[in-house]
Amino acid sequence: MSANNASEWTTAVEEAARLITDGEVVALPTETVYGLAADASSEQATRRIFEIKNRPPTNPLIVHVDGVEMAQGLVAEWPESARLLAQHFWPGPLTMALPKNQRIPDSVTAHGNTVALRAPGHPLMREVIRVSERPIAAPSANLSGELSPTRAEHVTERLGGRIRLVVDAGPCRFGIESTVIDLSGERPTLLRPGHIHEQAIFEATGIQIVPRPTVAEGPAKSPGLETRHYSPEATLHNWKWDSEDELGRLLDEHEINAPDTYVIAHRVVPIKARKTHYIVFPDDAEAYARALYDQLHQLDRIGARHIVVEALADGPEWNGLRDRLSRASRGKEPAS
Ligand code: TXA
Ligand code: MG
């Protein structure tokens, strides 16, 4: 169902809110990626999300709220750090994990004692929360381990047969998943980098976010971060090259200098004719993120075997993208 003009929009909001209130699962746009949405207060509805995505029950869901008041109703405490972060970054692509209260069923939090909360910035998603008068649990609307959808057709292609409604409100503005911060421990900890990075948070709030401990240092805090994730079907390589000739040598060495190899470059852009295909990306983190997943979905669709991505710059605005690309390039072992 498309929501590209005022009357379609109203119908889509009403239909989505009705289905969610009835305990169904629907796909909705957010400003980051499309989400698979259900009533967060319903054990049964949220279990359906796990079934549809084939998601391990150990991986908790993000709960979407319409603002601070609804968020406060779901947590055991609302620390000063949460107040500040919400004030500066909500609505928007920032998720905070906080000690939960009894209102959120264990299925949502994977039996953990925290709940991850986010007030999305997308007007349609906000309106569905408001009309349905309840928090909405929504992971990215993809099969577990696969690429997140940034367009409605990405959802329809992979999950269309399993859900009653996909609301199409066009491509997502940010194109990568929200930043996730754990506020339940002694120090605010980054669980998943995203568009809102540590430096921006420090500048706005004075809060210092510490990197999450490596796997060796402690148990998995955010299961989505420990396994292969965000992966296209093709094998993805992250390489750095300083000249076009160097890229040529790398392709030859890896024996993938062939027509089913696609090179995504944004700085040292090749111009010589080769057997591989070249795709030129913007040298701007926000524009890059907006285009990336759609490009990877397209390459999967045309049967690309190898995707070579030019290494990203060091700046904090690239942190989220660097994280997703390194995860996508890991081996093909199944996500746990
Ligand atoms: O941008 C987004 O965050 C999108 C849109 C739909 O809001 N959602 C999304 O959800 O990316 P999902 O489920 O694909 O990723 C959520 C991540 C997972 O890595 C999960 O492990 C982590 O957040 N997470 C969820 N609840 C958590 C909790 N209570 N504590 C720690 N991590 C949690
Ligand atoms: Mg996901």
Image: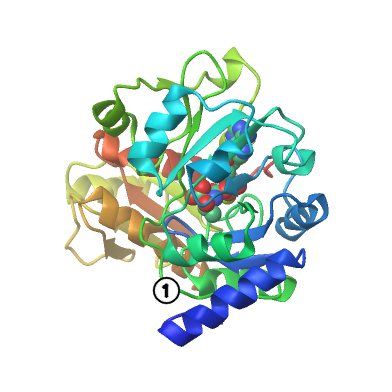
Above/below status of 224 relative to 39: above
Residue 31: in sight, yes or no?
Answer: yes
Image quarter of residue 184 = top right
Q: Is residue 25 above or below residue 207?
A: below
Q: Which colour scheme appears in the figure?
A: rainbow
What's under tag 1, amino acid-wise? Answer: Gly
Q: Position of residue 146 (x, y in %)?
A: 59, 54
Task: Check the image and report above or below for 4 versus 224.
Answer: below
Locate residue 335, reporting x and y percent. 67, 43
Is residue 271 positioned above or below 210 on the image?
below
Give the side of residue 141 with respect to residue 18, left or right.
left
Frontmost residue, 76 versus 85: 76
Q: Residue at x 60, y 45 (%)?
A: 62
Location of residue 140 (image quadrant): bottom right
Q: Quadrant of residue 195?
A: top left
Q: Left of 251 or right of it: where is 14?
A: right
Secondary structure beneath dot 1 equals loop
User: Where residue 272 appears, x then y in whole percent?
Assistant: 18, 63
| Residue at the image position 22 percent from the left and 57 percent from the top | 282
> Where is residue 330 drawn, in percent x and y?
53, 40
- Residue at 75 percent across and 35 percent down: it is 102
Q: The N terminus lies in which quarter of the figure? A: bottom right
Residue hosting label 1: 170
Q: Residue at x 61, y 27 (%)?
A: 221
Q: Is residue 120 left or right of residue 110?
A: left
Check disc 1: other Cα within 10 Å, few if <14, some if 14-19, many if 20+.
some
Give the quarter of the figure containing the C terminus: top right
